[in-house]
Amino acid sequence: MQSVVLLDTPPMACVVEEGVFDAWSWCASDSLEWHRPAKLADERGIESANPPGLVFVLRDAAAHAFLPRELARLHAFGYELAEDDEALAPWAIDDATDLLYERRARPRDVFWLAAPALDTLVWGLHDWAHFHNHGPFDRPAMTELQCDLIALAWLRRNAPLIGLDDAALARVARELATLSRTRFADECIPPPVSDLDALFSGPYPSDRLGR
């Protein structure tokens, strides 16, 4: 059985260097409506791509026809979806980030999140950060680091509501640090801090990284 949970997703300070984002907090985040399963699966680790089962379901497809869409029931299962309910196309997260900003469409008015597993929830929160903070995405590792840190902060904030213990949160932090390390290595640039594991295991940064 599915249930509806309203996750607290307040605005967070930008902690990466200036220029990575060109419209930080263009829309102040506040909450994310999450339709969750009775038991949150946690068998998969957090990897580089959006996992299967992560679906942003449109509240009113006709009102937001500017977004790339597919039938929601092709991607989200067990949510009592209507035959014609639509969702953001799984390949269109980056497109949605740009289009929501261009149209000044408030994400909470557009979507609710279907996420049946812990990795899908983490990526959903990561994408939720993207939707509220626009960037040119010409520095992917730094952009993704910022959204990972926000997603983790939101996950910790909502951990009692989600049902996550300290061990689960620590595992997510380790996996995000590993993923971030790989991104910086792929770009052949150093991360803004020498110890990404310590960055992710600690509280949300209180100052710009790399100072």
Image (cartoon, rainbow, N blue to C red):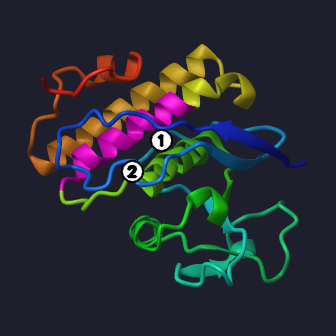
From this view, report whether residue 143 is shown above or below residue 88. above
Query: From the viewer's perspective, is 154 left or right of 161?
Result: left
Residue at point 33%, 33% (across, down): 178
Residue at point 79%, 83% (across, down): 84
- Quadrant containing the C terminus in the rendered view: top left
Question: Label 2 amino acid?
Answer: Ser
Tags 2 and 1 touching, CB below 8 Å: no
| x then y, percent, for residue 83 | 83, 81
From where the camera sits, is residue 53 visible? no
| x then y, percent, for residue 9 | 57, 38
- Mainly helix, strand or loop, the magenta region? helix
Q: Name the residue under label 1.
A: 46
Residue at point 29%, 57% (across, down): 135
Question: Label 1 amino acid?
Answer: Ile
Q: Mark 2 points at which residue?
A: 48
From this view, report whether residue 140 is shown above or below residue 105. above
Query: From the viewer's perspective, is 130 left or right of 194?
Result: right
Rendering quarter of residue 146: top left
From where the camera sits, is residue 44 visible? yes
> What is the secondary structure assignment of the residue under circle 1?
loop
From this view, report whether residue 162 is shown above or below residue 160. below
In-front residue for pair 209/114 = 209
Query: From the viewer's perspective, is 70 left or right of 147?
Result: right
Rendering quarter of residue 150: top left
Q: Is-magenta flag for residue 153? A: yes
The CA distance from mark 2 to mark 1 is 7 Å
| x then y, percent, for residue 85 | 76, 77
> What is the secondary structure assignment of the residue under circle 2?
loop
Q: Is-magenta flag for residue 151? A: yes
Look at the image and give the residue range highlighted in magenta: 139-154
